[in-house]
Image: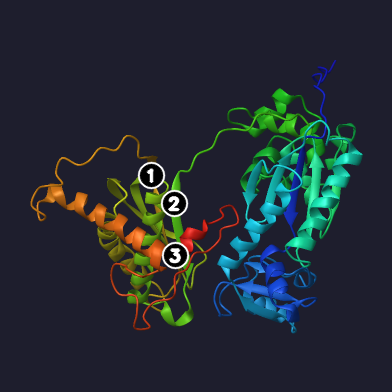
Amino acid sequence: MPEPQPLLPPRPLRWLFLDLNSYFASVEQQLQPELRGKPVLVAPVDSDTTVAIAASVEAKRYGISTGTPVWEAKRLCRDLIVTPARHEKYVEFHDAIIAEIWKHIPVTRVCSIDEVACRLLDNENSVEAATALAHRIKAGIRAHVGECLTSSVGIAPNRLLAKLASDMQKPDGLVILPAEQLPQRLYDMPLRDIAGIGAKMERRLARDGINDIRQLCERRPRDAGTAWGGTNGDRLWYLLHGVDLPEKATQSRSIGHSHVLSPGKRGVEPVRLTARRLALKATSRLRRKSYRSRLLVLHARFEDDKSVWRASIRLPATQDSFVVLAALDALYPRLVAAGRTRPGDFQIRMVGVTLAEIEPVAGEQPSLFALLDPDDPLARETRTLSLSRAMDRINERFGRNAVSVGPLHGGRIDRVGTKIAFGRIPELSEFHE
């Protein structure tokens, strides 16, 4: 006789999840009225060898999406309009959207540049009240931020389900998943639609006989957790049944930046200068967040290979730009040597720098070595860290690159501005770095 399923607690509607539709492209259509109603692709640089970082609703109808190579997108849609990314504008619109949502409901979590989660109170969580609230938020964004900025809203008992609901109807959708429809309402969705289930986890579940959401949910929580593996493996079973579990605590583990180089700037020296600028930006962020790093990672993609080349070097626990640049200088010849062995010699499409093994700087005391001779090795880092912080203050006041380390001019380096990863929204101060 099969073991009965556990009794579940009450599962009222608790979360509203808002996902802005084709966000970067929609901002461009708002700023450029001539682009409205047309297929638009937003690209990081003006090159057919790069990929889309956003596609408008009209472009998506041609099969174009984030990650589609520009040359392929142009083949799919002859009328496609390619426009360069303007990340500072996307942050400005993001801030305006968050301010508008706050007029209607407190924002519980900003999940990404285009996703927001809000927890519903008891007087907001009936189907009727939640529906009216969603319509007010969507209308407020269109009226007060931009008519091109539509959004899809999902409402459900927990944040995972609200996110899944927001993906069910796009663009400009509104989907509610009440407890009495769970988990059956999810059975038609692919497993890969659930955050945390990628190709590797999908294969793992398949080996255990789980090929879809129905098969996962029909198991007992313990058995579903065993198939998932790891600690708290049964969390997903409870979430898919609508239980609002406490959030797991997370913390930053790395800070980094990457840059896709324009075709004429993919040689040894331009890549080196770009990597230095990325290292300076990452170290400035490290200081602003009061962290220090113990590991520098240099990574790159070659033009003839989709895989990522990666190498690392240990650091003393530091937030000093000069220490990081010295480590980068020691690491860079390894990238050059790897590039020399490839067909077509050294041609780098993307380069990135990451500061890993970061930890908070707590209870920092003035250095005992600050008053030593400036050339004394014990005093050098104290003085260069002070110089690094002074550069931060100057750039914040007078603008990006008011003062920097090394050459920035002469046409040898791409402009390295602040970019947006969808999971991280830059502070406006980063656009001065």
Crowd tier of the residue under label 3, counting other residues whose Cα lies within 10 Å: few below 14, some 14–19, many 20 or above: some
Q: Residue at x 52, y 64 (%)?
A: 419
Residue 235 position (above or below residue 287): above
Q: Position of residue 79 (x, y in %)?
A: 75, 84
What is the spatial separation of the Cα atoms under label 1 and label 3, in whole angstroms? 19 Å
Crowd tier of the residue under label 1, counting other residues whose Cα lies within 10 Å: few below 14, some 14–19, many 20 or above: many
Residue 221 position (above or below residue 309): above
Q: Nearer the viewer, residue 50 or 123?
A: 123
Residue 120 visible to the viewer? yes
Q: Quadrant of the N terminus?
A: top right
The residue at which mark 3 appears reads as 432
Number of numbered labels in the structure image:
3
Q: Position of residue 372 (x, y in %)?
A: 9, 48
Q: Secondary structure at mark 2?
A: strand
Q: Position of residue 36 (x, y in %)?
A: 77, 76
Q: Position of residue 88 (x, y in %)?
A: 56, 66
Q: Quadrant of residue 282?
A: bottom left
Amino acid residing under circle 1: Tyr
Instruction: Find out whether the residues at labels 1 and 2 contact each other: C-beta distance under 8 Å.
Output: yes
Q: Secondary structure at mark 3?
A: helix
Could you tell which of marks 1 and 2 lies nearer the N-terminus? 2
What is the spatial separation of the Cα atoms under label 1 and label 2, in whole angstroms? 10 Å
Q: Quadrant of residue 221?
A: top right
Instruction: Find out whether the residues at labels 1 and 3 contact each other: C-beta distance under 8 Å.
Output: no
What is the spatial separation of the Cα atoms under label 3 and label 2, in whole angstroms? 17 Å
Amino acid residing under circle 3: His
The residue at which mark 1 appears reads as 291
The residue at which mark 2 appears reads as 255
Amino acid residing under circle 2: Ile
Crowd tier of the residue under label 2, counting other residues whose Cα lies within 10 Å: few below 14, some 14–19, many 20 or above: many
